[in-house]
């Protein structure tokens, strides 16, 4: 069975600025039935801007977070394809840039280095995530 994908997804998944800790992450990004279009658009935006992003979790390699959010109103975690976890060495600029993207709804700061950032959140909700060094970003 072939995966339903798109030209944009192929560009994002094979972008020169992206890397993966697990190949299921790439497959998740390619599959239109797994990840939301806004997530791909927000990721494309940061990659095209020149940020070098290491993806650390998407859906297949993430725990079920479908209990989060407000059922029936929004449920935009990893399980429903609206979030991914990643890392970028240019952390401050990366997180601030994500905050200014209107598609981004929530950003989680994982680990001490990320939690020490001084971020102007704007309309984006920024929260302290767990102690695992990562940036969780979630779209509308
Ligand atoms: Zn996450």
Image (cartoon, rainbow, N blue to C red):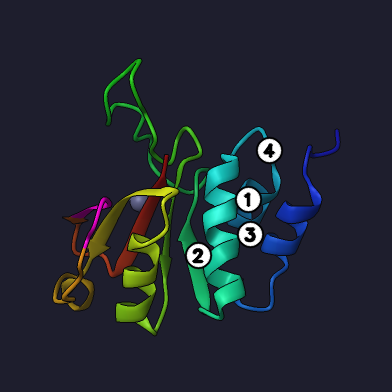
Which of pointers 3 and 1 lies earlier in the amino acid sequence? 3
Which quadrant of the rendered structure holds the N terminus?
Answer: top right
Q: Name the residue under label 2.
A: 55
Say left or right for 55 vs 63: right
Can see residue 18? no
Say left or right for 27 vs 60: right
Q: Name the residue under label 3.
A: 23
The one nearer the camera, 94 or 58, is: 94
Which of pointers 3 and 4 lies earlier in the amino acid sequence? 3
Q: Are marks 1 and 4 in contact (CB under 8 Å)?
A: no
CA gap, disc 3 to disc 1? 10 Å
Q: Mark 4 points at which residue?
A: 32
Q: Name the residue under label 1.
A: 29
Q: How would you rate the neighbour count of disc 3 (Cα within 10 Å): few for under 14, some for 14-19, many for 20 or more? A: few
Can see residue 82? yes
User: Residue sitting at 35 percent across and 56 percent down?
Assistant: 136
Residue 55, magenta (yes or no): no
- Per the image, label 3 sits on a secondary structure element best described as helix
- Per the image, label 4 sits on a secondary structure element best described as loop
């Amino acid at each position: 069975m072939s995966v339903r994908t798109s030209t944009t997804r192929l560009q994002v998944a094979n972008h020169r600025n992206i890397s993966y800790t697990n190949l299921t992450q790439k497959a998740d990004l390619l599959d239109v039935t797994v990840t939301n279009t806004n997530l791909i658009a927000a990721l494309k935006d940061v990659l095209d801007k020149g940020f070098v992003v290491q993806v650390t979790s998407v859906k297949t390699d993430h725990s079920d977070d479908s209990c989060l959010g407000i059922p029936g109103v929004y449920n935009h975690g990893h399980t429903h394809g609206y979030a991914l976890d990643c890392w970028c060495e240019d952390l401050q600029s990366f997180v601030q840039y994500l905050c200014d993207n209107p598609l981004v709804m929530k950003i989680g700061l994982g680990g001490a280095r990320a939690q020490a950032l001084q971020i102007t959140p704007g309309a984006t909700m920024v929260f302290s995530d767990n102690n695992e060094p990562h940036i969780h970003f979630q779209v509308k």
